[in-house]
Image (cartoon, helix red, strand yellow):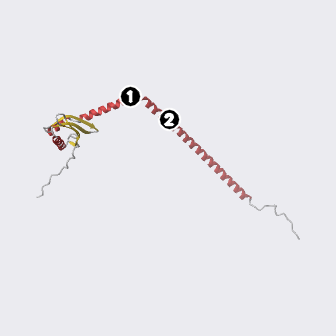
């Protein structure tokens, strides 16, 4: 005997569980959509700010370049050259004040032998260093050599050396010497000596 029946009249699944899962998926999709839209708005705003900053920087750079060109065009090069020449002349005058002819000739008078005559002297001052060129006429080469040695022994002259020599028509020695010159007024001041405390008397 065979039984007949329709077993598919009520499908075997939980409708509530399926509905809950679909709702959860939809909620997640909505949340992702809202997040992506918010992030996109933030990025768009940041890009607009960066573009505005770049435009402002470009405008500032263009303005600075324009000002530089205007300044260059307004500079009078002839006036600048004249000003530079005046500055060099003023510096030369300031340097010349540091060279005392009285002190220099005092050293010459104290050291020059009777057989040597000073015919010309030319000091050169550059950045505080003084170099003196002297033209000497001497009876003998030994007299000139003695004078050079005496100059160095004063302590005010250094690196004294001849740069040229010949004879005059009357047989005198004509020698050009060059020397560094550092008189005491321009020499570095010596370091002060350390003060010593007076010795205490021994107790009785």
Label 1, label 2: how far apart the Cα atoms are:
29 Å
- Circle 1 or circle 2, nearest the eye: 1
Residue 148 in the figure: left or right of residue 35: left
Q: Residue drawn 52% across and 37% down?
A: 58
* On screen, residue 179 above or below 10: above
For residue 8, side relative to residue 101 (left or right): right
Q: Which of the numbered marks, if any, corresponds to residue 192?
A: none
Q: For this rendering, which residue is in front, 182 or 108?
A: 108
127 above or below 6?
above
SS assignment at label 2: helix
User: x and y percent of residue 126 in the render?
Assistant: 28, 38
- The residue wearing badge 2 is 62
Query: Taking 73 as reference, is 45 above or below it?
Result: below
Residue that badge 1 annotates:
78
Residue 182 rendering spot, x and y as whole percentages:
22, 41
SS under mark 1: helix
The image quadrant of residue 16 is: bottom right
Quadrant of the drawing holding the C terminus:
bottom left
Query: How crowded is the residue under tag 2: few (<14 C-alpha within 10 Å), some, or many (20+)?
Result: few
Left or right relative to 182: residue 78: right
- Quarter where residue 109 is shown: top left
Of residues 175 and 45, the one nearer the viewer is: 175
Residue 51 percent across, percent down from the top left: 55, 40
Which residue is rendered at x = 46% and y = 32% of the image?
A: 69
């Amino acid at each position: 005997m065979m039984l007949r029946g329709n077993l598919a009249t009520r499908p075997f699944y939980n409708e509530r569980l399926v509905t809950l899962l679909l709702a959860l998926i939809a909620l997640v999709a909505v949340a992702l959509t809202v997040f992506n839209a918010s992030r996109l708005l933030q990025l768009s705003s940041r890009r607009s700010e960066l573009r505005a900053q770049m435009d402002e920087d470009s405008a500032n750079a263009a303005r600075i370049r324009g000002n530089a060109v205007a300044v260059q065009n307004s500079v009078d090069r002839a006036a600048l050259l004249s000003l530079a020449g005046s500055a060099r002349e003023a510096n030369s005058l300031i340097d010349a004040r540091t060279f005392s002819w009285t002190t220099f000739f005092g050293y010459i008078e104290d050291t020059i032998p009777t057989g040597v005559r000073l015919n010309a002297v030319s000091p050169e001052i550059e950045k505080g260093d003084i170099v003196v060129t002297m033209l000497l006429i001497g009876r003998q080469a030994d007299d000139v050599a003695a004078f050079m040695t005496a100059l160095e022994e004063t302590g005010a002259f250094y690196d004294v050396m001849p740069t040229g020599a010949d004879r005059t028509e009357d047989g005198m020695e004509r020698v050009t010497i060059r020397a560094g010159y550092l008189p005491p007024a321009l020499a570095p001041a010596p370091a002060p000596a350390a003060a010593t405390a007076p010795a205490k008397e021994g107790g009785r």
